[in-house]
Image: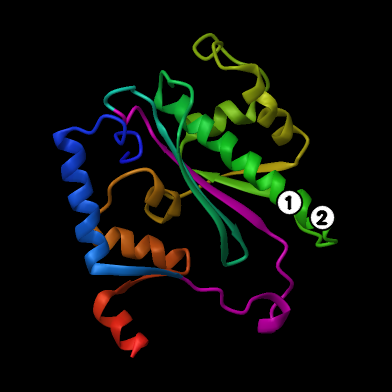
Amino acid sequence: ELARDSAAPTVGSVKNVKRLARFYKKYKRLVVVYPWQGERAGLPAVRKLTGKVDSNFANCHKTRRSTSGGALVYGCHTWDGWSLTQEVVATSSGESEFYAIVKGAITGLYIFHLLRWLDVEGTPTEVLSDSSAGRGMAARIGTGRRVKHIETQMLFVQHAVARGSIVLKKAKSETNCADLATKYLAQHVMTRLLKLCNMKLIGAGVLAGLVR
């Protein structure tokens, strides 16, 4: 949001910058933890790649574009995350969730084939979404009357689901880490979701102690 306002900042943009500055003053680092997993931890080999996705419908009041957010997880390791403004103006929350699923599927398939090229075998990529409408649009072939305007290049995900390359699953809203990338959250909710992704915020006092 700050990047969008950089060309023509407003009073609201200044407030958002101050809010970000206060956050950075309190929390200096975001630490991503990668614990042992699979055979290293005495457990079965990790083979599952999971994309957790979400969207915030029409959250930009100027352009009415939605935001896609997500995280790509391999076992319990968070490998990638994104928060992007959707290029197309979605006309419904279900459509914006569908675009979020498409982004998750693209990223998941890319990493899946990269792992296969490295001779790492795995199960088909799972994409988790808390939207039944978005999952329904991705699980069928073709479009209905209400979404016939969707660009045809987005529909590849339907065929990926049909042939089993992508597995769609329901995500619980209260444990969906992708919420971190799509909307403002209370501090306790943000801390809980970061913990689910094996991430934690380091405060200024803790960081100063570590440096010393």
Residue 170: percent from left, percent from top? 52, 45
Quadrant in the rendering for residue 143: top right
- In-front residue for pair 146/12: 12
| Distance CA(mark 1)–CA(mark 2) | 6 Å
Type of amino acid at the residue the image marks with label 1: Phe
Q: Is residue 41 above or below residue 113?
A: below
Q: Residues within 10 Å of mark 1 (few under 14, many from 20)?
A: many
Specify the quadrant that holds the C terminus. Answer: bottom left
Tell me if label 1 and label 2 are in contact, CB under 8 Å. yes
Quadrant in the rendering for residue 67: top left
Identify the residue at the far bottom of this view: 212
At a point 55% along the width and 34% down the height, the residue shown is: 135
Q: Residues within 10 Å of mark 2 (few under 14, many from 20)?
A: few
Q: Is residue 203 left or right of residue 153?
A: left
* Magenta range: 32-60
- In-front residue for pair 14/172: 14
At a point 31% along the width and 69% down the height, the residue shown is: 28
Type of amino acid at the residue the image marks with label 2: Arg
Q: Is residue 96 left or right of residue 174?
A: right
Residue 112 is labelled as: 1
For label 2, the residue is: 116
SS at mark 2 in the image: helix
Specify the quadrant that holds the N terminus. Answer: top left
Q: Is residue 64 above or below residue 77?
A: above
Residue 161 colored in magenta in the image: no
